[in-house]
Image: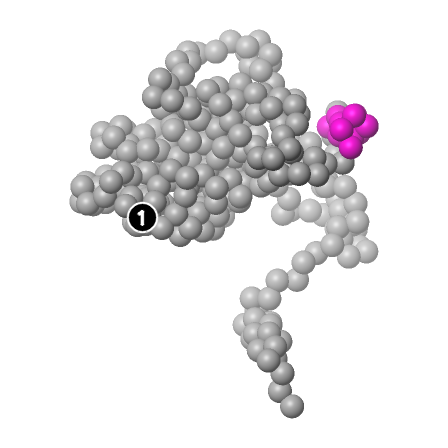
Amino acid sequence: MSHKLDWVQESLNELKESGLYNNIRTLASPQGAWLVVDGKKVLDFCSNNYLGLANHPKLVQAVKDAVDQYGVGPAAVRTIAGTMDLHIELEKRMAEFKGVEDAISLQSGFMANLAVIPAVVGKEDVIFSDELNHASIIDGCRLSGAKVLRFKHADAVSLEQVVKENLKNYRRGIIISDGVFSMDGDIAPLDKLYEVAKKYDVMLMVDDAHGEGVIGHGGRGIVDHFGLHGKVDIEIGTFSKAFGVMGGAAAGIKSKTKLKIKQTIKTNTYEKSSLF
């Protein structure tokens, strides 16, 4: 006798047969070059723990100190009674680290894209999206209800053509691109994308999840790499890659008056504005 949920197992079987079923590996050790996975010691080539911070003694001790002082969680959503001074301090340091006016922390980088994109564009607007953008950007775009128009990967000429032909049909537009693309590791030509954004007066947003900790002074990411402080409207980041922990962030300008930052910053200034 068939059951109303039989289709679930049938779908899982189809995924397995097509090689698309995801077998989640279970770690039984800290992140590092060598891991214990499913009871075996293996060499890890797939972690995003670029800087080895996931089990760094300084971070481990900071977590212990925070738990001793605050407990293991806020026990409420931030909009009611879950915002702690730790959140505010993190966001202040993140803004300083990125060289922007303000920042806000979220549960994950994926969640940051889902939260931010629908907040800035809607059904009357248009999104110009790199054709190889991350799935979280794609989901955020769909959730917004805005029209999504793709341009050729890392191609500012293609972007300008799409913007020029379509922007006039919408209330406002935003250009969105990954900073460092997670699959191929190539870097978006953010300087050229900015020129298009400036020329046509559209917003510019970059997801720098894989650029943080890798490029820019002290790992500040792609905006710093290209010297575009105060020119990129929104930066999306994550703490679960190079920073080795968990969470996401959105950073950028908070008003029409953009923060003026010198393009040349002394090394000791960067040291003082360390995120940790």
Where is 274 relative to 73, above or below? above
Residue at image position (58%, 21%) is 93
* Residue beneath disc 1: 123
Q: Is residue 63 magenta?
A: yes
Residues 38 and 273: in front is 273
Residues 46 and 89: in front is 89
Position of 191 compared to 220: left or right?
left
Dot 1 falls on a residue whose secondary structure is: loop
Q: Is residue 56 magenta?
A: no
Q: Position of residue 220 (x, y in %)?
A: 52, 25
Q: Can residue 104 be seen in the rendering of this structure?
A: yes
Position of the N terminus by quadrant: bottom right
Where is 203 relative to 101, above or below? below
Residue at image position (38%, 38%) is 120
Residues 112 and 190: in front is 112
Q: Can residue 133 be seen in the rendering of this structure?
A: no
Magenta stretch in the rendered image = 59-71
Residue at image position (24%, 40%) is 171
Position of the C terminus by quadrant: top right
Q: Position of residue 169 (x, y in %)?
A: 19, 45
Q: Amino acid at mark 1?
A: Lys
Q: Position of residue 42 (x, y in %)?
A: 75, 50
